[in-house]
């Protein structure tokens, strides 16, 4: 009797994982990887992947989608546009933000946001819960319930006037996270330094976009990281430090991890490929490059690449925060805003993976010692899946979801505004030429993008329930081993 065919076989490609690259077919049945190996049986459908790389779909764990920003502005993308753009860029999962603002009820925020995502998303998704109103109900009722329901990460801002959380309420939120085993993600910059610098620069007439970079002193990052790490250590709470931009910041993370503290960190393409000089453009054009923290120096780029290769930083996200270059976005305060009035953020969902692939795989950045492909897969898919407890994601292996991006490693693409599928209207990466681009993207075995055409349907993306505790990779001390009277007094609480 002939064997039952698989639903789909991706045949003749090179499969890339976080540890190896090898010639293999990938068979898919029921939306899951059924087998990986050479000479697999037939599929009802087949994709010829000869000459292609068959990689886990990208996971972008830091994306602002259909969200009101720290400055009170709705960003340019909907779930439909953002996840379309993400899929064209080789991604199969995003984590975006259910963002509470002051005076708002977190439960209602999550319910409303879930409805938007369910209607629009073409790829799978999860949420970080932004807490900006850490009152009794949020901390003692909503957070425990929502974490228990599968929203296993919380995001806090240590800066931005309208949403920042000071040290004491931050500890309240951390304790709620600890007691319910959620990860705390943080935008960590010293608010006072930024606010003080910004006001004085504007008073002196230094208002052009390039002064945004100067208004976020590099020391504001390391200081906030150190304070944050000390707060987290007080209660042995795992933290994820978002968008590391400086060499000193990366060093603080390295030192903390060397002490065995449960500190994780990410950086973003804008810190690997841009410097503060990108903001220095005629007129107000530099507003497109206003994001926080700002890009730094060439030496910082090199330090961040090293930190990625050493494992000090575990993932590279886009921090996609799209604002149009018009009165709805970057220029919402008028045609000639000061840098302080410019909406902070840049689009990056679609360009993230091609930029990284080009640098790590095609150009072979030396930090990765010939293992750029494996590191690319690890940093962009396998590791974020484990850090954020994404079930069945991040690997091409039997039993995992068939979330797959088939890359043409030889395809040369010059990035243009028109190539992007998000609603920002521009990309800060326009004009860069990269080698390597994803041709076909499958989510749970279904084509979302194939041969450059959109196949996915809004609403087909699924919410990913994340339960079961912290990241599967504690860096050091185990909670059970802690001596509460020595250092971690808060474990008595
Ligand atoms: O400038 C940025 N990154 N805007 C988005 C919000 C944030 O800070 O992550
Ligand atoms: Zn941030
Ligand atoms: Zn962000």
Image: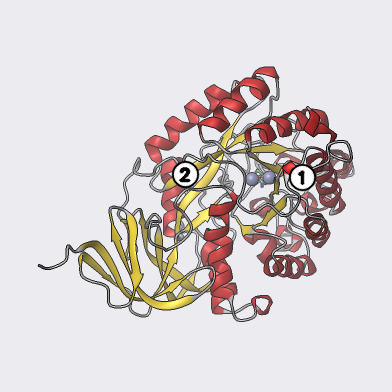
Q: Quadrant of residue 162?
A: top right
Q: Quadrant of residue 29?
A: bottom left
Q: Nearer the viewer, mark 1 or mark 2?
A: 1
View quadrant of ligand 1:
top right
Depth order, front residue of 219/47: 47
Q: Is residue 22 left or right of residue 287?
A: left
Residue 283 appears in the picture as rendered: yes
Please identify the residue farthest to the left as the structure is shown: 1
Name the quarter where the C terminus is drawn. Answer: top right
Labelled disc at residue 402: none
Q: Residue at x 64, y 54 (%)?
A: 473
Residue 98 % position (x, y) = 56, 34
Residue 450 % position (x, y) = 32, 62
What colour scheme does the image use?
secondary structure
Labelled disc at residue 125: 2
Query: Does residue 237 sit above or below 427 in this rendering?
Result: above
Q: Are marks 1 and 2 in contact (CB under 8 Å)?
A: no
Q: Residue at x 63, y 33 (%)?
A: 180
Residue 187 appears in the picture as rendered: no
In this figure, which residue is indicated by the disc labeled 1? 481
Depth order, front residue of 427/59: 59
Query: Does residue 311 sit above or below 80 in this rendering?
Result: below
Secondary structure state at the residue bearing disc 2: strand
Query: Does residue 491 sit above or below 440 in this rendering?
Result: above
Residue 43 % position (x, y) = 21, 66
Depth order, front residue of 336/406: 406
Secondary structure state at the residue bearing disc 1: helix
Per the model, the C-alpha gap separating discs 1 and 2 is 35 Å
Q: Is residue 360 left or right of residue 91?
A: right
Residue 95 % position (x, y) = 53, 45
Closer to the N terminus: mark 1 or mark 2? 2
Depth order, front residue of 283/430: 430
């Amino acid at each position: 009797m002939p064997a039952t065919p698989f639903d789909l076989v991706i045949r003749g490609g090179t499969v890339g994982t976080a540890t190896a690259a090898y010639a293999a077919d990938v068979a898919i049945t029921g939306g899951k990887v059924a087998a990986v190996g050479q000479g697999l049986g037939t599929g009802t459908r087949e994709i010829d992947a000869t000459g292609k790389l068959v990689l886990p779909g990208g996971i972008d764990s830091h994306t602002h989608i259909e969200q009101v920003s720290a400055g009170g502005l709705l960003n340019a993308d909907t779930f439909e546009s953002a996840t379309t753009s993400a899929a064209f860029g080789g991604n199969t999962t995003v984590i975006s933000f259910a963002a509470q603002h002051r005076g708002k009820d977190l439960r209602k925020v999550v319910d409303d946001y879930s409805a938007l995502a369910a209607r629009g998303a073409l790829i799978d998704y999860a949420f970080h819960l932004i807490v900006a109103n850490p009152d009794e109900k949020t901390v003692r009722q909503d957070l425990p319930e929502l974490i228990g329901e599968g929203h296993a990460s919380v995001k806090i801002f240590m800066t931005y006037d309208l949403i920042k959380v000071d040290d004491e309420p931050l500890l309240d939120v951390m304790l709620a996270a600890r007691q319910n085993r959620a990860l705390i993600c943080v935008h960590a910059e010293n608010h006072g330094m930024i606010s003080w610098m910004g006001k004085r620069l504007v008073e002196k007439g230094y208002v052009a976009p390039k002064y945004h970079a100067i208004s976020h002193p590099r020391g504001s990052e390391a200081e906030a990281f150190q304070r944050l790490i000390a707060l987290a250590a007080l209660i042995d709470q795992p933290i994820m430090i978002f968008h590391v931009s400086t060499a000193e910041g990366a060093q603080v993370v390295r030192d903390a991890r060397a002490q065995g503290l449960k500190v994780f960190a990410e950086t973003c393409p804008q810190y690997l490929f841009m410097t503060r000089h990108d903001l220095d453009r005629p007129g107000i054009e530099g507003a497109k490059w206003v994001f926080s923290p700002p890009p730094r120096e060439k030496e910082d780029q090199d330090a961040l690449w090293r930190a990625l290769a050493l494992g000090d930083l575990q993932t590279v996200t886009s921090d996609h925060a799209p604002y149009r270059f018009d009165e709805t976005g970057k220029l919402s305060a008028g045609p000639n805003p000061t840098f302080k009035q410019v909406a902070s953020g840049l689009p990056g969902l679609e360009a993230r993976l091609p930029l990284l692939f080009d640098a790590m795989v095609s150009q072979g950045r030396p930090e990765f010692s010939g293992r750029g492909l494996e590191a690319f897969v690890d940093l962009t898919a396998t590791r974020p899946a484990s850090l954020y407890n994404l079930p069945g994601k991040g690997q091409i292996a039997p039993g995992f979801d068939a979330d797959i991006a088939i890359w043409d490693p030889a395809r040369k693409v010059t990035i243009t505004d028109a190539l992007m599928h998000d609603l920002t209207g521009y990309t800060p990466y326009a004009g860069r030429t990269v080698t390597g681009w994803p041709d076909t993207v499958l989510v749970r075995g279904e084509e979302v993008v194939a041969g450059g055409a959109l196949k996915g349907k809004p609403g087909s993306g699924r919410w990913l329930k994340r339960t079961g505790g912290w990241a599967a990779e504690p860096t050091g001390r185990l909670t059970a081993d802690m001596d509460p009277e020595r250092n971690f007094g808060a474990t008595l609480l």
